[in-house]
Image (cartoon, rainbow, N blue to C red):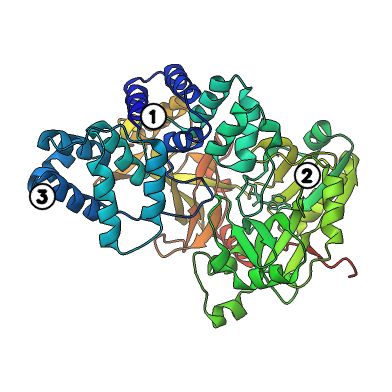
Amino acid sequence: MAALAVTASAIGATSSKLEKVRLLAAYLRTLDPQRLPVATRYFAGRPFPSGDTRVLQIGGAALSTVLRELTGIDGDALSRIYRRHADAGDTTHDALLEAGRGGTGGLDLVGVAAAFDTIAAGGTPRQRAGLLRELLAGCSPEEARYIVKLISGDMRIGLREGLVEEAIGRAFDRPATAVARADMIIGDLGEVALLARDDRLDDAQPRLFAPMRYMLASPVSGAAEVITRLGDEVWVEDKYDGIRCQLHRDAGRVLLCSRDLKDITEQFPEVVRAARRVEGALLLDGELLAFRERRVLPFAALQTRLGRKRPPPQLLAEVPVVFVAWDLLFQDGESLLEQPLRARRERLEALGLGDGFALAHLERARGVDALEQLFLDARARRNEGLMAKDPDSAYTPGRRGLAWLKLKKPLDTLDVVVIGAEWGHGKRHGVLSDVTFAVRVDGSDELVPVGKAYTGLTDAEIAEMTAMLLERTVSEHGSYRTVRPDIVLEVAFDAVQRSARHRSGFALRFPRILRWRRDKPPEEIDTLSRVRAIAEQLAEGPEQRVDPATAEA
Ligand code: AMP
């Protein structure tokens, strides 16, 4: 632990990423197989392997009590030390040093790991605090600093996971890409370090109940680009508007993980029940969707289920959720990552998943025209877009690769007129960069505001527009100025919502300026009825299609 502390301090003291990697690599190289995974995890800021759900459960108050008992320093003095650093680890270091109470140190990493195991094993808060006191009593102040940093979940030495990966590669002379691939699959840097040491990085395979990073899609602009990238044969699935989910199942156990690899199993008991009815050891990739009466419900419905642990029966009945699968990544001990999508889909369909499951709707297209037609159909169904996949591609966890492409239909844009402005903040102070804009009430000259935008124009355009807005100022009310409405902008947005804040009754969500429409006179801007129509269409949600999951159906 002493060497780890020295290394960590040296890494924290340099801002050079290269130097951080060099220092860590040199240290990792000195470790034996028992200590290497432990230390690597610690440098990644994790007391336990990732995917291991144990926590140390020692809060600030408990730590403060332990420190007072250990050092005799009173609460006020301890708070003063804390204010100096705003970091629990540094506070611990200084408190032990000031009180002359640090142990001689020389703790073994294996001993620290064992102590963490015991603390996490439970017991009352008092018992846990007692265990921590014992652990810290044997530490030097430097060691204690990093033990407490680990407990609070962050080493704060400017070492992102990517740099730890680099250091592993460098320590054992392995390619960075091989280390990164193994980390994407296993998700635990400690184990990756061991594999790198033994030159077994290629052995990294998905494991059930260890969440794996997802394969992601890259955005493309249109059908032609898809064909250029993927070749003539393209598989097209609906792009669902739900939440990404990884489903692990084996006899007696089910795990559901979210996009950020959190355990969300308890939130979706009906999916868990459905997964229990399936056979085999499986890892599926897909999306959770609210689904009732053979129809996918809009995202807003699913939203009522998010974050609700053990949802009440009424909610379960109102918003039932299904798992729409598009990939099978592991089956009965066999990793399917390197298999082509064709083979994975075939095995997925052969599973005969039953109630509670569906399959992503799949169309096989050849050539630009066929693809273009699918895209038009999706638009007609108000779908956000399509996913195009290369049927011959492997599954690459954690990569925004080019084997999966997403075609997104941008929402309609609106042409609006600027009716007011305010001075910007920060970098934008001194320019009128915050503009309020309006649409026209149908059949009249009345303008009603629908939103405010800050971004999208170049600095030169903002400067030019500031001068024009100053010229056009009609009146000032506090920081807001009303201007003569003749600057037309095209704005994009994520949604239109009903809102009492604006006189129009609507507000654009996340509006951003796409273009300054110098070519368009204010008489020709969009009208309130168009805003209303977009809002109504959005409220209905897209029509998303799924395929039945049972092979016989
Ligand atoms: P984005 O969030 O825009 O980067 O799009 C990627 C997300 O689209 C994924 O994380 C999935 O949640 C979602 N998605 C919807 N339909 C599919 C599909 N058929 N295949 C893969 N991802 C999909």
- The disc placed on residue 5 is none
Q: Residue at x 59, y 77 (%)?
A: 316
The residue at the point 61 percent across, 61 percent down is 255
Element assignment for label 3? helix
Amino acid bearing label 2: Ala
Residue 281 to residue 25: above or below:
below
**Between 404 and 120, which is closer to the camera in this rendering?**
120
Q: Residue at x 36, y 54 (%)?
A: 119
Residue that numbered label 2 is attached to = 388
Q: Looking at the image, is mark 3 or mark 1 earlier in the sequence?
A: 3
Disc 2, SS: strand
Question: Which quarter shows the C terminus?
Answer: bottom right
Amino acid at circle 3:
Gly
Q: Nearer the viewer, mark 3 or mark 1?
A: 3
Residue 104 to residue 499: above or below? above
In the rendered structure, which disc, 2 or 1, sits on the residue that comes first in sequence?
Answer: 1
Q: Quadrant of residue 55?
A: bottom left
Q: Residue 61 placed where, x, y %?
A: 22, 55
Q: Residue 453: where, in percent of width, then height?
A: 44, 44
Q: Which residue is mark 3?
A: 75
The one nearer the camera, 125 or 262, is: 125
Residue 511 appears in the rendering:
yes
Q: Is mark 2 within 8 Å of ligand 1?
A: no
Asked whether the viewer can see residue 321, the reply is no
First-in-chain label (2 vs 3): 3
Instruction: Quarter of the image for the N terminus: give it.
Output: top left
The residue that mark 1 highlights is 158
Residues at marks 3 and 1, CA–CA distance in whole angstroms: 30 Å
Q: Position of residue 518 (x, y in %)?
A: 55, 34
10 Å neighbourhood of mark 2: few (<14), some, or many (≥20)? many
Question: Which is in the foreground here, disc 2 or disc 1?
Answer: 1
Label 1: which secondary element: loop
